[in-house]
Amino acid sequence: MLDESTIVAIATANGIGSISIVRVSGKDALPIALKISKKDSLTPRLATLSTLYSHDDKPIDEALLIYFKAPFSFTGEDIVEFQCHGGVAIANIILDEVIHYGARLANPGEYSKRAFLNGKIDLSKAEAISKIIEARSEDAVKLLAKQLKGELSNFVEDIRKDLLFMLAYTEVSIDYAEEDLPEDIFEKIEYKLGNIKEKLSNTLDASKRREGMIEGFKIAIIGKPNVGKSSLLNRLLNFDRAIISDIAGTTRDTIEESVKIGTHIIKIVDTAGIRDETTDVIEKIGIEKSINAINEADIVISLFDNSKVCDKEDEKILSLLEETTDKTIIKVLNKSDLDNVFDKSKLDDNFISLSTKESIKLLILKLETILDKNTHADEMTLISKRQVDSVEQTLYHINESTTPLHTGELEFFAHHITEALHNISNITRPFDNDEMLDVMFGEFCLGK
């Protein structure tokens, strides 16, 4: 049930800036704004310069007021925005005045919730609003902007229509067997099922490949001690973040920092050196964290020392890489400025040779290529675990529906299609059984 109280919140980030925005939404938004501004009226969608006054008639600020009349607003309710001078103090005084006149402080996400309940946005757009604020790359912003424009909504709606078509015809076959149905109806249903399977499978695959695009791709730098991991981190960051020394085990813990590569903000994790044996308890914990970092990373940069023989510790790293089949691996032969001793054949000729003391441009170009490849594709992408779970469950029931369709067990087929409908609809808006009835009685004229 929709809460009819009037809500208020500061819509801009804390801190000093040129303006701050205080947003009021609800049936009392306009009356409250008129009291604070001492105006007789506000013209919708017209910025009005006004002096704002406290309830004891003291001037607060000179600000712009913009009135969005329902239903032509983000929430679908009356909204008034106070655009005052920037700074924490002024915005908070206005906030307190609005509350004094009967509004309450908005809960987190309540504006978007009201927009959803009033039919202004669906759940996929609400999630896109939340994610676009946290976006870590330009490509993420472009993707989320598409979802705000309804790309995912349209994708889901197309699948819903096909599923409703199947369910409607199946219910007719069960309940109105005497009705004349198209002879090829079950061939059409099977064809639509195949198309939906392909769409959902491709979407899941693309979403998993591009999982790091919204939160920021995670890159782990691994290698044995003294191979140059911290030096590489410092070069990527362009400042000395990690301590560098010739003493093995200097880095005891993982170090995380963010840096921009091309159009992407990525999180780089410098790990403790991985080696076979150590008596140092702290170092052992660091090594365990290094292995966890590999599991959590999207891309793994593995460093080897060009000036040293490939030893057991290097072999252990290579073994870990062979076990890591679901990650993008970049092998780097560091210290190319020194005489080559390392057996390059161990790296299968698939490596980048460089020196962190000279230039890491080749590595940066490689990273940029990989990141662009994972983000520039046009496939539909899911942006939350909730959406992924919904698609996985939809795909499960689509797959389960195939056998009862072939064996003529239409009640079981209808059950799985109904479950698929409920699950795919969770991405945008809940499925209403009346939608299926509308298709049945509208398309087949069964109400005669």
Image (cartoon, helix red, strand yellow):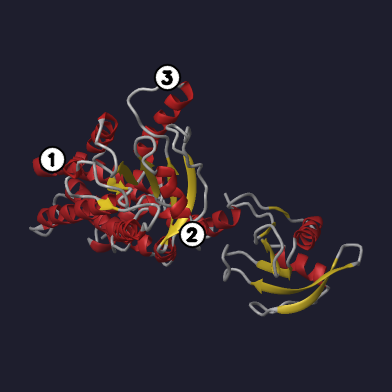
Q: Position of residue 332 (x, y in %)?
A: 29, 48
Q: In the picture provided, is 428 more to the left or to the right than 6?
A: left
Q: Which amino acid does label 1 sit on?
A: Thr
The residue to which callout 2 is attached is 132
Q: In the picture provided, is 407 more to the left or to the right than 239?
A: left
Residues at marks 3 and 2, CA–CA distance in whole angstroms: 47 Å
Q: Position of residue 25 (x, y in %)?
A: 66, 61
Whether residue 169 is visible here, answered yes or no, is: no
Q: Which amino acid does label 3 sit on?
A: Thr
Q: In the picture provided, is 325 more to the left or to the right than 290?
A: left
Check disc 1: other Cα within 10 Å, few if <14, some if 14-19, many if 20+: few
Check disc 3: other Cα within 10 Å, few if <14, some if 14-19, many if 20+: few
In percent of the image, x 79 and y 59: which residue is there?
89
48 or 184: nearer the viewer: 48
Residues at marks 1 and 3, CA–CA distance in whole angstroms: 59 Å
- Relative to 229, residue 29 above or below: below
Q: Position of residue 421 (x, y in %)?
A: 31, 49
Whether residue 379 is visible here, answered yes or no, is: yes
Tag shown at residue 403: 1
The answer to which of marks 1 and 2 sits earlier in the sequence is 2
Number of numbered markers: 3
The residue to which callout 3 is attached is 279
